[in-house]
Image: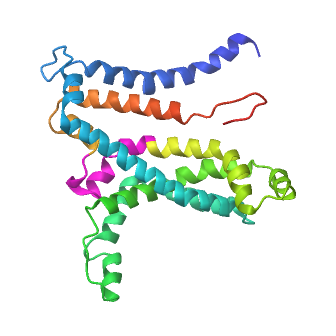
């Protein structure tokens, strides 16, 4: 195949990136420099970095995203490790993927039914004599539901990294007198780190800008940068401020990607 034909094959991908990645980001960056009257201004950025409200939203967004990522990782890593030891692991991975095929809105409404005052969880607590509790519109319910939705996206990259680890490394560790715990911390964990980093990227970055789950499950008690963007674009119609927050989110995501990227060293190994 000639170089010219190879170049033609890249055209659809380049057009896709241009239309659905570069162009939207350029528009967000462009609108961030205009106010409600569509006048050029830097006031949006000045307001964001000097307003206690927006700074608190930023702290909340990072804090909630961190909690969701940590909880997801604590659940996903042992699950991925357990699946690698099963006989029909492809079937189990398929079962992990299946929930991602369900619409996010449907899953949110399902949890509303579960956590509602007359829902299954409260009914079970009442049957045990524990009474009814306010489970919806709390920080805990928001974090748990968000973590549940993100779990498959953390399991898959970790599972792929674990399956790529040769059994010879583990056996060599045992031959050298290492215990199972030492083998895990000094052999398995470092070698699975590329999958862990990829999972952190996949979970942490979207969690920074959650707005649907924070509205439906957390109510109006949880205000993050994602809900602020929704508010400015759909309610106040202040597209400039909404775009400014979007730019900050994009920069934050790039920082996270740079901090968790897999670095290739000599010999083709990753760290």
Residue 96 place in picture, x, y as percent? 57, 59
Q: Is residue 113 above or below residue 37?
A: below
Q: Residue at x 67, y 50 (%)?
A: 189
Q: Quadrant of the C terminus?
A: top right
Residue 145 place in picture, x, y as percent? 39, 59
Q: Is residue 151 above or below residue 5?
A: below
Left or right: 120 with respect to 102? Answer: left
Residue 73 part of the magenta segment: no
Q: Is residue 27 above or below residue 133?
A: above
By what rule are the colours in the image chosen? Answer: rainbow
Q: Which residues are magenta?
A: 205-223
Q: Residue at x 62, y 34 (%)?
A: 262
Q: Residue at x 33, y 82 (%)?
A: 125
Q: Residue at x 33, y 53 (%)?
A: 213
Q: Quadrant of the N terminus?
A: top right
How would you classify the magenta stretch by its main secondary structure?
Answer: helix
Residue 49 place in picture, x, y as percent? 24, 28
Q: Is residue 151 above or below residue 253?
A: below
Residue 60 place in picture, x, y as percent? 30, 45
């Amino acid at each position: 195949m000639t170089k010219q034909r190879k170049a033609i094959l890249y055209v659809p991908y380049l057009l896709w990136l241009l239309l659905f990645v570069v162009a939207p980001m350029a528009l967000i960056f462009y609108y961030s420099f205009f106010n409600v009257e569509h006048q050029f201004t830097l006031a949006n950025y000045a307001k964001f970095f000097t307003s206690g409200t927006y700074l608190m939203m930023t702290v909340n967004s990072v804090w909630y995203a961190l909690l969701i990522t940590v909880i997801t990782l604590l659940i996903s890593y042992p699950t991925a490790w357990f699946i690698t030891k099963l006989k029909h692991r492809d079937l189990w991975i398929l079962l992990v993927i299946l929930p991602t095929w369900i619409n996010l809105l449907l899953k949110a409404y399902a949890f509303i039914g579960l956590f509602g005052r007359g829902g299954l969880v409260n009914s079970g607590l009442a049957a045990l004599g524990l009474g009814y509790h306010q489970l919806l519109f709390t920080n805990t319910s928001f974090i748990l539901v968000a973590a549940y939705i993100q779990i498959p996206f953390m399991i898959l990259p970790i599972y792929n990294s674990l399956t790529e680890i040769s059994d010879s490394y583990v056996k060599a560790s045992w031959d050298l007198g290492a215990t199972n715990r030492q083998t895990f911390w000094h052999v398995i964990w470092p070698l699975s780190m590329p999958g862990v980093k990829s999972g952190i990227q996949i979970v942490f970055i979207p969690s920074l800008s959650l707005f649907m789950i924070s509205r439906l499950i957390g109510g109006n008690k949880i205000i993050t940068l994602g809900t602020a963007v929704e508010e400015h674009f759909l309610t106040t119609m202040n597209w400039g401020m909404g775009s400014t927050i979007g730019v900050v989110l994009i920069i934050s995501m790039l920082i996270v990607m740079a901090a968790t990227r897999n670095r290739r060293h000599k010999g083709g190994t990753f760290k």
